[in-house]
Image (cartoon, grey):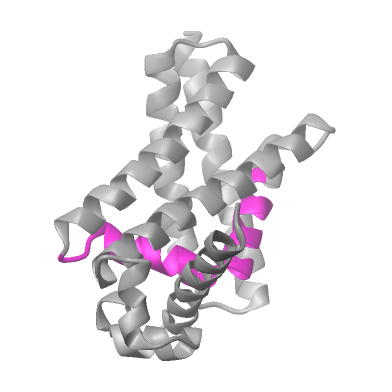
Amino acid sequence: MGVRAQQKERTRRSLVEAAFRQVSAERSFSSLRLREVSREAGIAPTSFYRHFRDVEELGLTMVDESGLMLRQCMRQGRQRIAKGGNVIRTSVSTFMEFIGNHPNAFRLLLRERSGTSSAFRAAVAREIQHFIAELADYLELENNTPRSFTEAQAEAMVTIVFSAGAEALDIDLAQQQLLEERLVLQLRIISKGAYYWYHR
């Protein structure tokens, strides 16, 4: 990659990171303005269009990155499991670590999942489906059960996990620990239920 291409990629990265910083508990992506994001990134507003067609394209890039970061984090969790960690507890703690480290990325996924933009809703739905598919792959391999079965199990688990994640954004550490224990219990119930349903 040439010097100019590297500079362009750095500026594009700066815009994405600036937008993530401005998303918060009080502020949704839809309220962001091009001039604010550009100023936060330290570039002229007119330069924005060299990197993104419009603010919506920036937002869709952020959704893609948020989903990818989450999947990469959970892959790291599965590596911990392979080294002897408890499957459900390690997965839950890894997920909560992601929320703690990237709260605005998770907020973006939550809000745009049911937002007013059909393009954003579709993008978030794709990311969640990727998440479900990777979990289904893991369950299929570990439990030696049919794909259709593991997909149903994975979808149930992801639905509960995302709901717990929404709660985790606005609670203190003690409450989060209680939430993690509840989530571990719920996922164990799904896992046990799936096992007995399949082997009945």
Q: Is residue 161 left or right of residue 56?
A: right
What is the x, y in percent for residue 51? 37, 67
What is the x, y in percent for residue 105? 47, 66
What is the x, y in percent for residue 101? 63, 68
Q: Is residue 20 left or right of residue 53?
A: right
Res. 67 visible in picture:
yes
Res. 26 visible in picture:
no
Q: Residue at x 25, y 58 (%)?
A: 120
Q: Is residue 198 left or right of residue 7?
A: left
Query: Which picture quadrant has residue 141?
Result: top right
Question: In this picture, which residue range is highlighted in magenta?
Answer: 91-116
From this view, report whether residue 134 is shown above or below residue 182: above
Along the viewing direction, whichever of 10 and 89 lies nearer the viewer: 10
Q: Magenta stretch mostly in which secondary structure?
A: helix
Q: Residue at x 37, y 27 (%)?
A: 152
Residue 69 lies within the magenta run: no
Along the viewing direction, whichever of 174 and 58 lies nearer the viewer: 58
What is the x, y in percent for residue 7? 56, 68
Numbered-mark total: 0
Residue 106 lies within the magenta run: yes
Query: Which picture quadrant has residue 43?
Result: bottom left
Along the viewing direction, whichever of 36 and 145 lies nearer the viewer: 36
From this view, report whether residue 14 is shown above or below residue 105: below
From this view, report whether residue 79 is shown above or below residue 98: above
Along the viewing direction, whichever of 177 and 5 lies nearer the viewer: 5
From this view, report whether residue 121 is shown above or below residue 175: above
Q: Residue at x 60, y 45 (%)?
A: 72
